[in-house]
Amino acid sequence: MIEIRKTTMDSEDAKALIQELNQILVKITGDDGTTHFQQTDVEQERSVFLIGYIDGEPFACGGLKEISQECGEIKRIYARKNQCQMGRRIIKALEEEAKRLNYQKLVLETRIQNEHAISFYEKNGYIHCEKYGVYRNNENAYCFKKEL
């Protein structure tokens, strides 16, 4: 059974998934990705953190935070390898949450070295865009946007 649940970053499942993500990012990019992310980012009124479960086991996570009234930012997307497309399910669920929260656009950042992530976002309809916010001067940042 596949289920996606809203949760908080301090849940044991969230901590485990984020720790795995951090370790993978260090191997790929040399950075764990936590510099521009705080737990409180997904605890605000127009934010959410989701975990995807397969038969009760956590397999994927992702967050959404407010950038502006019209724009949300996708954060900390991660999926363990499986056959159920949990990464796709999480990003689609975050897009539905964004629509519910009346965002018109989503943005996100990954590192240029993270070819798997770049391919994943492109397959899910995200378009490469100009760097934004704290990523503007980061030579390793690769930013995406998607109109909702």
Image (cartoon, rainbow, N blue to C red):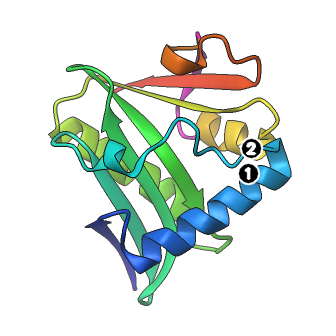
Upstream in sequence: badge 2 or badge 1: 1
Give the amino acid at mark 2: Asp
Q: Amino acid at mark 1?
A: Leu
Question: Eyeballing the image, is 134 above or below 59?
Answer: above
Name the residue: 17% across, 37% down. 101
User: Badge 2: how crowded within 10 Å, few (<14), some, or many (20+)?
Assistant: some
> x, y percentage for residue 95?
34, 42
Magenta-tinted stretch: 124-130
Residue 127 place in picture, x, y as percent: 57, 22
- Looking at the rendered structure, the secondary structure element under dot 1 is helix
Residue 21 as seen in the image, left or right of residue 72? right
Residue 7, position as x, y percentages in the image: 29, 67
Is residue 15 found left or right of 49 in the rendered image? right
Tag shown at residue 31: 2
Say which quadrant the C terminus sits in.
Answer: top left
Residue placed farthest to the bottom in the image? 55
Dividing the picture into quadrants, the one containing residue 4 is bottom left
C-alpha separation, residue under disc 2 versus residue under disc 1 = 6 Å
Crowding around mark 1 (Cα neighbors within 10 Å: few <14, some 14 to 19, many 20+) is: some
Dots 2 and 1: beta carbons under 8 Å?
yes
Residue shown at 52% from the left, 49% from the top: 76
Report x, y in % for residue 114. 77, 40
The residue carrying mark 1 is: 25
54 to 44, vertically: above or below: below
Q: Is residue 81 magenta?
A: no
Residue at 40 percent of width and 49 percent of height: 63
